[in-house]
Image (cartoon, helix red, strand yellow):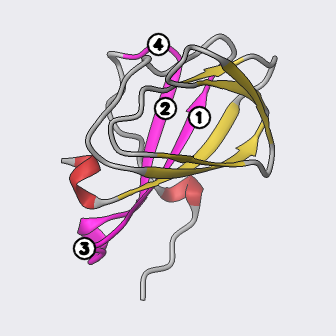
Amino acid sequence: MVIKNLKDVPHEDMSAFKGVKKQILIGPRDGSEEIVMRYFSLEPGGNTPYHSHGFPHVVKVEKGQGIIIDKNGKEHSLECNQVIYVEDDEVHGFKNTGTGSFDFICIVPPRGEN
């Protein structure tokens, strides 16, 4: 069993993306060979790239307000406690539209963190 506190988990290098912070809460280093739980925090105005990848993920909004842009370019408002499923190769992107941080948990298979 692995038990951690979010405040004790180091941040990954996300310097290529303005206003994006990422922590790997649970992953292969913890013995998890089937899932990786990540925590993202987007500063006001911060966003992830509009992208796709060959693995699915599930997302739960933890804090703040933002949007997800779907494969058709449509923006969907997001707020605390909403959940999202993004399929393999589905184009998407997240953006903070609020005045505070926009935080979400993102769970992917291990190949999503390699």
**For mark 2, what is the residue?**
21
Mark 3 vs mark 4: give the one in front: 3
95 displayed left or right of 80: left
Pointer 3 or 2: first along the chain? 2
Question: Which sits earlier in the primary sequence, circle 2 or circle 1?
Answer: 2
Magenta-colored span: 17-43
Query: Residue 17: which numbered mark, if any?
Result: none
Q: Amino acid at mark 3?
A: Glu
Is the residue 25 above or below the residue 93 in the image?
Answer: below
Q: Residue at 76%, 41% (x, y): give it.
A: 63
Q: Position of residue 61 (x, y in %)?
A: 70, 45
The CA span between labels 1 and 4 is 11 Å
Bin the neighbour count of mark 1 within 10 Å (Cα to Cα): few under 14, some 14-19, many 20 and up.
Answer: many
> What residue is pinned by disc 1?
41
Is residue 33 highlighted in magenta? yes
Q: Amino acid at mark 1?
A: Ser
Callout 2: helix, strand or loop?
strand
- Give the residue at x 36% y 67%: 35
Mark number, residue 33 = 3
